[in-house]
Image (cartoon, helix red, strand yellow):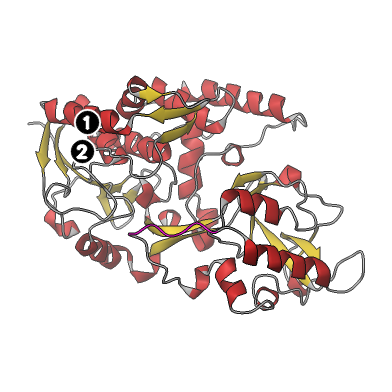
Amino acid sequence: MTKQISVVGAGLAGSECALQLANMGYAVTLYEMRGVTPTPAHKTTDFAELVCSNSFGSQGEHSAPGQLKWEAAQLKSFILKAAQDFSVPAGQALGIDREKFAAHVTELIEAHPNIKIQRKAVNTLSDIPRPTVVATGPLTHEPLAESLKEHFGQDFLYFFDAIAPIIDADSINTEIAWKADRYDKGTPDYYNCPMNKEEYNNFIKEIELARKIEPKHFETTNFFEGCMPIEVMVERGPQTLRFGPMKPIGLDDPRTGRYPWAVVQLRQDNKEATAYNIVGFQTRMAYAEQTRIFRMIPGLENAEFLKLGSIHRNLFINTPKMLNKDLSSKSDPWLFFAGQITGVEGYFESVCTGLMVAHFLNQKIQDRLLSVPPRNSAFGSLLNAITDEFKVDHFQPTNINFSLLPPLETHIRDKTIRKAAQIKLAREALANWKL
């Protein structure tokens, strides 16, 4: 008898997962509420609809997103093939004709003999037989979101991305920024960037004048205090940041022997210490404004940004705490998750989780030992980034970037040569993944 598998959500991750499983010979029931219950963001009932951008990001041979696509091609991603078939000129990026792309993915799924489509909303996790893959994305149906909250607990399902900018560690000016913990109570894990009064006042003024990205019509501006955008804090008064994330007390500048007027702190973002985030600097400022304004911070004048700050409505699980390495629930091992809900950010990263989960589920059904992508590969690095227990207490969504890949055993100063070496290792590693 053919094993029955349920996939909830026919976005990018769900569509990839359903096609992979169906191609393995499983009978897949794919649930999609659009066509019966609309979302505030989607415009069609097609599967894999691209809501915002029409780009899957860089295809550059020596870029991290490019390597992720190279690996997905080796793993025969259906969504990548469709994107390439319906690509539009976009420089190094993979631009897509979104209407033709979504229509084609819909046709692929509708024509597959092993996929049964159910156009209906799933209201609770108990509505669906196991094994199940939930790939419902940031606009999960409210009743199902409530069911997920019951499953994981109120503290482990968040409704906002509160993403601070992330900086390449090599671009921090350590002649100005120093490492210390407040009052020297703990280990000196934070870089501290000092500001005098004039620098601080100029910084605040630029934040006030900066162009902001307006929320989309389906997003709310009711922010939790814990993820308040810095520009909203500045609106409360020019000194608010000095008594919030830029509080200087207990952080004596070794160059002066006393604490400065204000301090910007950088916190290690990965085990390898190749990336640091700016603590408390979630923002809706336009990207160009962020780059310009954050380089006003002493010590970050030449900062290279691996990721810029943002806040937008989202649903994501504290994956390192609540999910296993195969992206199944720790309390319900036949309940899997894929897509943005796992804490990946970006269209193509979502696709890749759907592809991985299909293989993990196949391994489990066949009663084989779990085999995850090798750590040196882009797939393995992305999976590690969302399941690493190091991040349990400060888990935030991430996209693929070089800081996720493990550093080389021998450090190479030249960035181009270093990245090429990491790409070479990633390609060699992927061949060792036992699917």
User: In the image, is residue 214 part of the stretch drawn in magenta?
Assistant: yes
Quadrant of the snapshot with the C terminus: top left
Q: Secondary structure at mark 1?
A: helix
Q: Distance of mark 2 from mark 1, alpha carbons?
A: 6 Å
- Between residue 217 and residue 118, name the one nearer to us: 217
Q: Position of residue 304 (x, y in %)?
A: 69, 44
Left/right placement of residue 257 relative to residue 151 reads right
Horizontally, residue 399 falls left or right of residue 287, namely: left
Q: Amino acid at mark 1?
A: Ala
- Whichever of labels 2 and 1 marks the residue nearer the N terminus, that label is 2
According to the picture, the residue beneath numbered tag 2 turns out to be 46
Q: 265 or 216: nearer the eye?
A: 216
Q: Which of the 4 quarters of the picture holds residue 245?
A: bottom right
Q: In this picture, which residue range is highlighted in magenta?
A: 212-217
Residue matched to label 1: 103
Given contact means CB atoms under 8 Å apart, are the residues at marks 2 and 1 in contact? yes
Say few, some or many: other residues with alpha carbon within 10 Å of mark 2 (under 14 / 14 to 19 / 20 or more).
Answer: many
Residue 172, x across and y down, in percent: 76, 49
Q: Mark 2 is on which residue type?
A: Asp
Asked where in the image residue 154 lies, by quadrant, the reply is: bottom left
